[in-house]
């Protein structure tokens, strides 16, 4: 995603939003590694999940307005969908493990 944004014409508004929400996902997951509690871990991943969903929203707009090709969109959309699935699974697992203890 970062490579795409660096290579794109500067339509600042949309591209900035994709960059911000897209990079926030990784930053939040990194923060979750050192979470202070299971609740903090779930909170960080939940925010990352929201950022991932926002990124999908902006990718859809970029695709609909033809700022990205179908191939670029498909690649980035697949990545985001995979991240969503991983984040949801991690949140569910953590919540289930928390209930067992």
Image: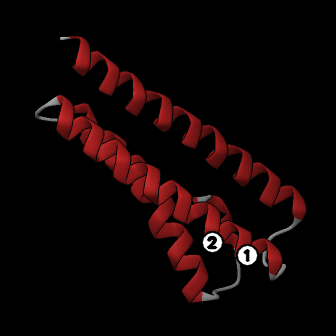
Closer to us: 90 or 95: 95
Q: Is residue 30 left or right of residue 84?
A: left
- Under tag 1, what secondary structure? helix
Q: Quadrant of the N terminus?
A: bottom right
At a point 63% along the width and 86% down the height, the residue shown is 10
Which of the labelled discs sits on residue 58, or is there none?
2
**Residues under labels 2 and 1: Cα distance?**
6 Å
Q: Residues within 10 Å of mark 2 (few under 14, many from 20)?
A: many
Q: Quadrant of the C terminus?
A: top left
Q: Is residue 12 above or below residue 92?
A: below
Closer to us: 66 or 94: 94
In the displayed orientation, state which residue is furthest to the top: 101
Closer to us: 84 or 10: 84
At a point 59% along the width and 77% down the height, the residue shown is 15
- CB within 8 Å, label 2 to label 1: yes
Q: Is residue 3 left or right of residue 31?
A: right
Give coordinates of residue 99: x percent, y percent.
24, 19
Q: How is the image coloured?
A: secondary structure
Q: Is residue 89 above or below residue 65?
A: above
At a point 56% along the width and 70% down the height, the residue shown is 18
Q: Is residue 24 above or below residue 26?
A: below
Residue beneath disc 1: 62
Q: Is residue 35 left or right of residue 79?
A: left
Q: Is residue 64 left or right of residue 91?
A: right
Q: Quadrant of residue 4?
A: bottom right
- Under tag 2, what secondary structure? helix
């Amino acid at each position: 995603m970062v490579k795409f944004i660096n290579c794109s014409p500067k339509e600042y508004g949309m591209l900035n939003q994709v960059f911000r929400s897209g990079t926030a996902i990784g930053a939040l997951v990194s923060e979750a590694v050192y979470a202070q509690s299971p609740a903090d871990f779930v909170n960080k991943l939940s925010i990352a999940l929201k950022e991932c969903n926002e990124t999908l929203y902006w990718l859809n707009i970029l695709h609909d307005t033809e700022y990205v090709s179908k191939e670029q969109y498909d690649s980035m959309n697949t990545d985001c969908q995979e991240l969503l699935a991983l984040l949801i699974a991690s949140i569910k697992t953590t919540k289930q493990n928390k209930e067992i203890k």
